[in-house]
Amino acid sequence: MDTILFEQLHTQGLISEASLDKVKAAEKNKLFSLHWELRSILYLGVLLLSGGLGVLVYKNIDTIGHTAILIFIAAISAGGFAYCFKAKLPFSSGKVASPNSFFDYVLLLACLSFITFIGYLQYQYHFFGNRFGLVTFIPMVVLFFSAYYFDHVGILSLAITSLCAWAGITVTPTRILQDNDFNSNTIIVIGLVLGAGLVAVGAMTRIRAFKAHFAFTYTNFGMHILFISLLAGMFVFENIYLLWFLPLTGVTYYFYKESLRTKSFYILLVLTLYSYIGLTYVIIRFLTWNSDMGSVYFTFLYFIGTAAGLILFLIRMNKKLKAL
Amino acid sequence: MIAYNNEWLNNLLVHDQADKASENQCISKSEKEQVYAAYPAGFYSPNFFVRVGLFILTVIIVAFSVGFFSLFFLDHMEQVGGLFIFFGFIIYAALEFMVKKRHYKSGVDDALMWMAAGNIIGGLNGITHISFLTNSIIVFVIAGYFFIRFTNGVMAAIASLALLAIIFFTVIRLGTIAKAVAPFILMIAAAGIYFFIQQLLKSGKWKYYTNGFLMISVIALVSFYAAGNYFVVREASIAMFKMDLKEGQDIPFGWLFWIFTVAIPILYITRGVQKKDPVLLRVGMLLVAAIVFTVRYYYHLIPAEIAMVAGGMVFIGIAYALIKYLHEPKYGFTHKEQNDAFFMDKLHVESLVIAQTFSGPQLSTTDTGTQFGGGSGGGGGASGEF
C-alpha cells in the first residue's frame, strides 16, 4: 500500500488517525506470499508423479519390477488416504476448510494413484472380468466419497468427469466438442439426461444445504452439457429442429432466473452465447429458404443487428445484476 | 497522450489502494466508501464476464460490417489491402468515439483496438509483399502507439517483442560475424530493455503504464534467456543460417550457451527471492522447465517416466519442506495467502484445471449407436469455457 497516498487521504479527512496507523503498520510488516508459487510446485509434483507412475507400471509389465511398482502405487494411495483421514477436520454438511494447503494435494495424489491402481488391476489380471463399467464405476464412487468426506471441489470435478465417462461421454473442458460424436443420437440423449441430472443435483445441493458450495460445480458442468446436447439435437434432427428450440428456450429461461438469483455474470454470459447460437441457427434456416443474393445481405444485417441488440441486453443486465 | 480520462485513471488507482487496505482490515467499510465518493471514476467498466461477452459481440458486429461493405467491392478484389486499411481507420475512429463515451476495459474498446490494429497490419501486407524487418517495424510502431494511447499490457508485450525482432533482423543482415554474435546482441538488448523498464517503474511517473511495464519485463526476461539458451541458439543456427551441423556436433561456444541455459533461471530465482520480486521469481520458476527440456533434448540420461517420478517427488518434497519451514513467517516470507478475495477462487478455476489435466482419454463404455449423417454437429463457437 502507498503510505503517502493514505497520509493524503488522512489530511483530507477521509480516513481516521487510527486507520492511517494501521496502514503504516501493515505496510511495515508486509509479507511476501509464496502461496501460489508453492501450490503450483505441489500441483506440478502431483502431476509428474502420478503421470510417471502410470507410464512406468505399463512399461515394466512382465518384469519382476512391475509388482514392486504396483505395490508402490498402492502404498502411495493408501498412505495418502491414511494421512487425509488423520489430518482432516471433522466432517460437517457445510464447508470445511482444508487443514493446510499440503492436504489438498495429498488427497489428489491418493485419488489419482487409486485410479491408476484399479485400471492396472483390470488390465493385467482382468480383476473385474468383462464388466468394464466397474473399472470406471469404482474410482467414481471413491472420488465422490473423497470429494464429500474431505471437502475437495477439485476431486468433485474429477468425480463428475468420471461419472460422465462412465455414462459414455467426455466432458473434459477442452475436449467436450472434439471427443464426443454429437451426431449420434445416443450421445445426445445421454447428454440431456446427464446435464439435466447434474443441474438437478446442483439445485438439490443448494436447497438441502448439504455441501451447498458444491452447487456451482454441478450446475456448471450440467449447464454446458445440457446446452451442447440441446444444440446438437437441433443440428442433428434437422426435420424437427423447431421442436428442439422449445426446450432450449425453457432451459435458457431457467438459467436466466438462476443467474439473477445467484447474481452470476458467468451464467449470464454462457446462456447468452448458447442461446444466440440456437436462435441464429433457426433464423438462418428461415432466411436461406431461397438462396439468392438478397438473403446473403440479410444474413449480414441479421448478425450486425442482433449483436448490437445483445450488447444492449448485456449492458442492461450488467446494471441489473449489480443493483441486486 | 492517454485516450482515457487521466483523473479517473488516477482515481481508479486510489480505489485499488482503498480496496487493499479494506481487505487487510486497515480501514473501515465506511471509510472506503468515503474515499470512493471523494475520488469518483466515471468509466463504463462492466463485470469481467460481461466484458468477454461485449468483446465477442463487438467482433461479430465489426466482422460482419466489414464483410457487408466488402460485398459491394467484390469486383475489385485486387484492392482488398487498401480496403482493409480503410476499415482499420474507421474502426480506430469508432474506438476513439467509444472511449469518449467513457468505455474503459469494457470489452468494446478492447475488441475495437485489436481489430483496428489487425486490419491495418493485415491490409499493409495485402497490398505488397513486406519483408520480416519492415513488418517488425510496422508492428512495433502500431503496437507501441496503442500501448501509449490505450495503456494496454498485451500491446506493450507485442511492441517489445517487435523491437527485439527489429534488432535481430537488422543484425543478421550485417554479415557472418554479426550472425555469430547475434545471440549476445539480443541478450544485451533484452537486458537493456529490462533495466530501462525497471527505471521507469521505480520513477513512479508512469503509474498508468505499470501493467504494460510488467508485461515488457516478463518478455525481456524470457527473451534474455531464450537468446542464450543452447537449444534455441543451435536449432536457430541450423534453420536460419543454414549452419551445417551433424547430429551430436556442437556449436561454437557451445559450453558458454550451456552455462547460460542452466545459470540464468537460477540467477532469476535467487535475485527474485533477494529482492522479493514476484516477476523475477515466477519467470525463473517457469524457466526451470526450459532447463529440463533442453538437457533432455540432447542427453537421454534416464527414461522420461523415471524422470517424471523422481521430479514429482522432488517437487512435492521441496514444497512440503518450504511449507513446514515457513510455518511461521521468516525473513518476510509466508506460505499463506495474502488476501482471500482472489478472482480465481470464486470460479473454482483450480478444480477445472484438475479435471482438465488428470482425466486422460477414457474409454467410453457404451456403444455409440447408429451414426446419423449429414448434420453439422459440433456447434462450433460454443466458447463458454474459459
Image (tube, coloured by chain):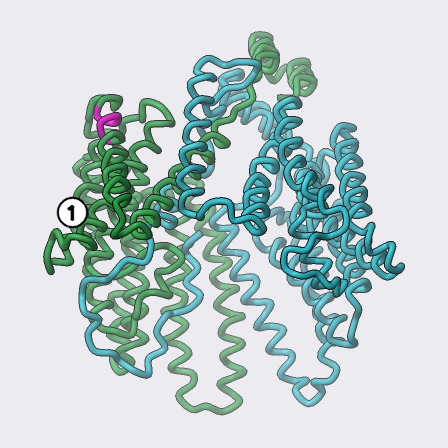
Q: Residue at x 44, y 22 (%)?
A: B321
Mark 1: amino acid: Ile
Task: Read off the chain for label 1.
Answer: A
Q: Is residue A313 above or below residue B11?
A: below
Give percent across and percent down for residue B14. Answer: 63, 28
> Neighbour class for label 1 at 10 Å: few (<14), some, many (≥20)?
some
Q: Quadrant of residue A129?
A: bottom left
Q: Position of residue A229 (x, y in %)?
A: 28, 65
Q: Is residue A79 visible?
A: yes
Q: Left or right of B66: which side holds A292?
A: left
Colour of the chain lettered B: cyan
Q: Is residue B315 magenta?
A: no
| Horizontal and vertical percent position of residue B361 | 32, 58
Who is closer to the viewer here, A217 or B76?
Answer: A217
What is the x, y in percent for residue B236? Answer: 70, 58
As helix, strand or loop, the secondary structure at mark 1 comes to: helix
- Which residue is pictured at 41% across the width and 72% down the height? A280
Task: Look at mark 1 in the image and give the residue it sits on.
Answer: A138
